Image (cartoon, rainbow, N blue to C red):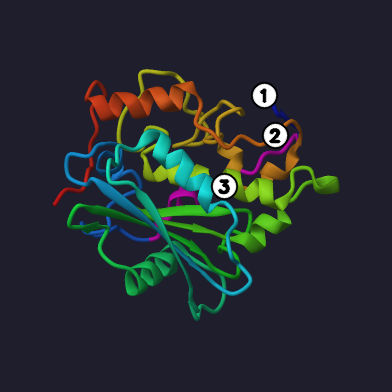
């Protein structure tokens, strides 16, 4: 599969957009990738729960795919479960990384609970303060996907569709929680886009830089990627088996 990407002007995703660096993250919350080893290995956590918080009108459709992708790479012998809950975030105005973090930690529990690792995926109404951004990873266990902006990113004649964009963006943001690309390690592969930190230069990877911005609507041929490519998987395997050094990890 190779998608054809068109457009002379690409929208660059700023660090504050992609990774939600509005403020210095507390030790408790960590940085995106801070729970990578807690997910990839079962040394501390043998199970995982994906908490999905969504507002009326922003119910997600890609959560089963999200679980499948995490099952493929994370060592959780006691399984990965999904808990979905409709909430009212009571937010006014554009979203910021700080607002996303505040809502997650007000409504959710600690990421580390006994033998269970908790990750939170928020689907709020409204848009990010940079409305070209479709999703953000704001700390070690928290992602927000803005389905209003996802709908706007639908391509001409519905190619790609909003549902396709949502699937790619959701897995992409989970990839950031896993530390991709080079967020908490240095890859032995040359696959990070030099102009977009934390993103792949391979448009067949779900970690391709344009996936989480409205530029994704310029994919007009082929399917949007929803899988980690071989180099992404190589990074994750190397992190898990200890052959790639991993830093900035959160532990009990």
Residue 97 vs residue 151, the one in the foreground: 151
User: Earlier along the polypeptide chain: callout 2 or callout 1?
Assistant: 1
Q: Start and end of the magenta stretch?
A: 7-22
User: In whole angstroms, how far apart are the C-alphas of marks 3 and 1?
Assistant: 18 Å
Q: Quadrant of residue 234?
A: top left
Q: Nearer the viewer, mark 2 or mark 3?
A: 2
Crowding near the residue tagged with mark 3, few <14, some 14–19, many ≥20 C-alpha atoms within 10 Å: many
Image location (x, y in percent) of residue 53: 46, 67
Image location (x, y in percent) of residue 220: 78, 36
Q: Are marks 2 and 3 in contact (CB under 8 Å)?
A: no
Q: Is residue 89 above or below residue 236?
A: below
Image location (x, y in percent) of residue 116: 25, 54
- The residue carrying mark 2 is 223
Which residue occupies 56% across, 64% down? 129
- The residue carrying mark 1 is 1
For residue 169, which numbered disc appears in the image?
A: 3
Give the main secondary structure, helix, strand or loop, of the magenta stretch: loop
User: Earlier along the polypeptide chain: callout 2 or callout 3?
Assistant: 3
Which residue occupies 27% across, 40% down? 77
Q: Quadrant of residue 4?
A: top right
User: In whole angstroms, how far apart are the C-alphas of marks 2 and 3?
Assistant: 13 Å
Q: Quadrant of residue 224?
A: top right
């Amino acid at each position: 599969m190779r998608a054809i990407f068109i457009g002379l002007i690409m929208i660059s995703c700023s660090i504050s957009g992609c990774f939600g660096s509005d403020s210095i993250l507390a030790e408790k919350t960590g940085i995106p990738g801070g729970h990578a080893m807690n997910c990839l290995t079962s040394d501390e956590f043998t199970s995982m729960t994906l908490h999905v918080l969504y507002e009326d009108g922003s119910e997600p459709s890609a959560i089963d795919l999200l679980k499948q992708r995490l099952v493929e790479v994370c060592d959780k012998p006691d399984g990965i479960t999904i808990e979905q809950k409709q909430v009212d975030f009571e937010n006014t105005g554009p979203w910021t990384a700080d607002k996303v973090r505040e809502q997650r930690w007000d409504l959710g529990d600690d990421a580390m609970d006994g033998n269970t690792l908790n990750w939170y995926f928020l689907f709020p109404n409204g848009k990010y303060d940079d409305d070209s951004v479709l999703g953000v990873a704001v700390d070690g266990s928290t992602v927000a996907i803005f389905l209003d902006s996802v709908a706007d990113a639908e391509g001409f004649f519905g190619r790609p569709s909003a549902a396709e964009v949502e699937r790619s963006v959701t897995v992409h943001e989970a990839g950031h929680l896993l530390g991709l690309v080079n967020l908490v390690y240095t890859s032995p592969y040359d696959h990070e886009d030099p102009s977009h930190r934390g993103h792949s230069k391979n448009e067949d990877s779900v970690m391709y830089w344009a996936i989480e911005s409205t530029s994704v609507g310029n994919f007009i041929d082929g399917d949007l990627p929803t899988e980690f490519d071989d180099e992404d998987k190589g990074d994750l395997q190397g992190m898990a088996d200890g052959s790639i050094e991993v830093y900035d990890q959160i532990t009990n």
